[in-house]
Image (spheres, helix red, strand yellow):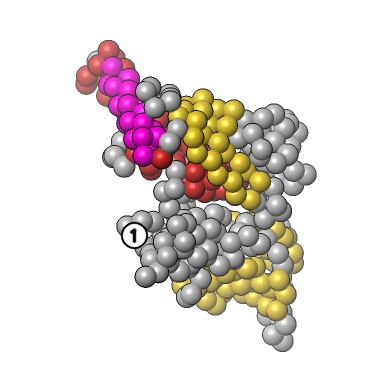
Amino acid sequence: RNLSDNLSDLRAQVAANNSGIRLLKELVGEWGLHTVQAYMNFIQQNAELSVRNMLKDFAKKNGSRTEAVDYMDDGTPIKLTIEINQSTGNATFDFTGTGPQVLGNFNAPPSVTYSAVIYSLRSLVGLDIPLNQGCLAPITFLIPKYCLLNPSDDAGVVGGNVLTSQRVVDVVLRAFKACAASQGCMNNLTFGDSKFGYYETIAGGVGAGPTWEGRSGIHTHCTNTRITDPEILEKRYPVLLREFSIRQGSGGEGKNNGGCGLIREIEPLRELTMSILSERRTLQPYGLAGGSPGQCGRNLLVKDGGLVVNVGGKCSTTINVGERLRIETPGGGGYGQRD
């Protein structure tokens, strides 16, 4: 990324904060500080009560203890044991058994785990409540020091927010038997040279659940980015978008099928450096209740002349004119056995 882009991003963040300050002052001016603070507390109390009721209901039907484990592509486990107090709705989320921090960059600070859990709990509640800290009031976290989810201060963490967070969500939803795994990845793609940089995340398949089929080709769980329109991409950057389509058949089968991933194929018009940071290239998104897993993703370099090279889940390489980078994103898992 070049300096002007970074400065523009910072100015946009400052402008957004100033807008927030202005709007909050207007709200206080209209209703008074006491009323605004009171309703801030009411929102958190409502979220806390909603989560406690959900946890009590789950424990009543399934018992006070549940656990789940899933793995990063390098084999690192993320293990979760949940103990629920059926009378109070308090719960302990214990990540003991999670693998040690890694030499790579997908370690995740505890704040990432907190965010993934609060997202999951809000989804499980089934009520339309604002996302707020009250959701975590009933939860006690146990995250062993120097594991993947609580690394040392000098550990690489850039991939934790966009990759490991998705696996934490997969594990929480699996523990609650809520739905099959979605693509479990944001498929982070960057390309550029000394004059520009471009970054996008690519959607995939959604996991199916007891009453729904997974959607195809959308972002899932804790991510909120939109992809650049093809016309804008090709106008502003020296690339051609050769294909952007649904990856048919990549969703897992079941009583309810998982959603399919996407195919995105990009050809540079001059030599560029392209980098991909992705997961679910080795281990499939799990199915649930007898459903089949979704297909793994693939990152392929199509050479001039047709030779296809698998570049792996995490790679940075030079791509030349006449070559193409083809990204096939994972599908979602299926739910339930077919009749």
Q: Quadrant of the C terminus?
A: bottom left
Magenta highlight on residue 55: yes
Q: Quadrant of residue 307?
A: bottom right
Q: Is residue 4 visible?
A: no
- In the image, residue 27 sits, relative to residue 3, either above or below, namely above
Q: Residue at x 36, y 56 (%)?
A: 210
Residues drawn in magenta: 38-61
Amino acid type assigned to the residue bearing label 1 in the image: Trp
Magenta highlight on residue 196: no
Q: Residues within 10 Å of mark 1 (few under 14, many from 20)?
A: some
- In the image, residue 97 sits, relative to residue 22, either above or below, namely below
Q: Residue at x 72, y 75 (%)?
A: 309
* Outermost left residue: 30
Q: Position of residue 188 (x, y in %)?
A: 59, 56
Q: Quadrant of residue 318?
A: bottom right
How many marks can you see? 1
Q: Residue at x 57, y 38 (%)?
A: 80
Q: Which residue is mark 1?
A: 212
Q: Position of residue 119 (x, y in %)?
A: 44, 40
Q: Residue at x 52, y 63 (%)?
A: 293
Q: Of 327 and 88, which appears nearest the observer?
A: 88
Q: Of 8 and 216, which appears nearest the observer?
A: 216
Q: Position of residue 288 (x, y in %)?
A: 47, 57
Question: Going by the image, does 181 lie left or right of 199?
Answer: left
Query: Could you tell me what secondary structure mostly forms the magenta stretch?
Result: helix
Q: Position of residue 242 (x, y in %)?
A: 54, 77
